[in-house]
């Protein structure tokens, strides 16, 4: 791709992080090209030369977000020895990550675009796919709990995965509305209080 129009000091990773922050704070539709270019330290022609379009920039920014902001939350599903501990750690890390100061609150994947967008639905479809993959990761971890004998054979992994994904999405909205880490942790406690009922056993 031609370098014409780019400043010599252009750093694609630094610029992409800046674009990510704008999209994270404003959402896809709310972020203007001029605001994105200004945050990235380049002009609008340079932005198009480097990324092709606003849509392509957003998709690359969400990939970057998933790589740099999401891993710690989702690694909880592997780090904890039991399904219950995995879900609790997943939600706890979510509460801490979503309420950090000095950056946008909540989750870009949840809040980036919820309605039909000017890209003919490309952005919404991509975020919907990502949310579906996240729900599948929860489903897979719960299935492992069943296979390990921690959860009963009749445990509804799909319903539980949807429930805990919904809790996470709600925490994203709460955080964007100003909820503190302590308030989000109270939501975690409430969600985990439902575990015995979901698992249909006090031993879970």
Image: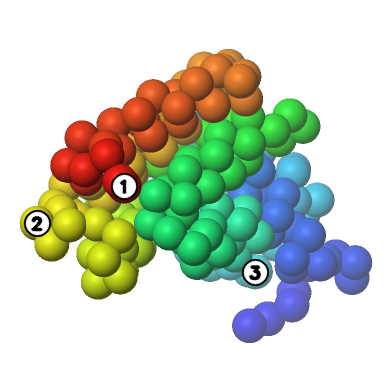
Residue at 21%, 43% in the rendered image: 201
Query: Marks 3 and 1: which is nearer the front?
Result: 1
Viewer-nearest residue: 110 or 114 = 110
Viewer-nearest residue: 48 or 122 = 122
Task: Measure how far apart labels 3 and 1 are at the Cα level.
Answer: 51 Å
User: 32 left or right of 37?
Assistant: left
Q: Which residue is mark 1?
A: 204
Q: Are marks 3 and 2 in contact (CB under 8 Å)?
A: no
Mark positioned earlier in the residue sequence (3 or 2) = 3
Residue at 63%, 36% in the rendered image: 96
Label 1 secondary element = loop
Q: Using the image, determine if residue 36 lies above or below residue 129.
A: above
Where is residue 124 shown, x and y percent of the image?
Answer: 31, 49
Where is residue 178 shown, x and y percent of the image?
Answer: 58, 16
Label 2: how many residues lie within 10 Å, few (<14), some (14-19) or many (20+)? few
Task: Measure how far apart labels 2 and 1 are at the Cα level.
Answer: 13 Å
Label 3: how many residues lie within 10 Å, few (<14), some (14-19) or many (20+)? some
Where is residue 165 shown, x and y percent of the image?
Answer: 33, 44
Does the image show residue 119?
no
User: 5 left or right of 127?
Assistant: right
Q: Which residue is mark 3?
A: 50
Viewer-nearest residue: 76 or 61 = 76
Viewer-nearest residue: 188 or 20 = 188
Q: Which residue is mark 2?
A: 154
Which image quarter holds the N terminus? bottom right
Q: Are marks 3 and 1 in contact (CB under 8 Å)?
A: no
Residue at 62%, 25% in the rendered image: 181
Mark positioned earlier in the residue sequence (2 or 1) = 2
Query: Marks 3 and 2: which is nearer the front?
Result: 2
């Amino acid at each position: 791709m031609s370098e014409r129009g780019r400043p010599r000091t252009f750093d694609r990773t630094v610029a992409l992080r800046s674009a990510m922050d704008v999209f994270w704070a404003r959402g896809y539709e709310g972020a203007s090209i001029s605001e994105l270019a200004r945050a990235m330290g380049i002009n609008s022609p340079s932005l198009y030369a480097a990324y092709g379009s606003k849509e392509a920039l957003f998709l690359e920014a969400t990939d970057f977000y998933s790589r740099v902001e999401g891993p710690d939350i989702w690694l909880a599903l592997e780090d904890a020895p039991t399904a219950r501990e995995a879900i609790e750690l997943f939600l706890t890390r979510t509460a801490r990550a979503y309420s950090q100061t000095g950056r946008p609150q909540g989750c870009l994947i949840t809040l980036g675009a919820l309605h039909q967008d000017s890209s003919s639905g490309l952005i919404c479809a991509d975020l919907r796919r990502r949310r579906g993959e996240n729900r599948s990761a929860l489903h897979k971890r719960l299935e492992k709990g069943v296979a390990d004998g921690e959860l009963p054979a009749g445990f509804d992994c799909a319903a539980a995965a949807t429930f805990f994904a919904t809790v996470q999405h709600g925490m994203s909205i709460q955080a964007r509305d100003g909820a503190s880490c302590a308030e989000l942790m109270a939501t975690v406690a409430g969600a985990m209080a439902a575990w015995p009922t979901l698992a249909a056993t006090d031993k879970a």
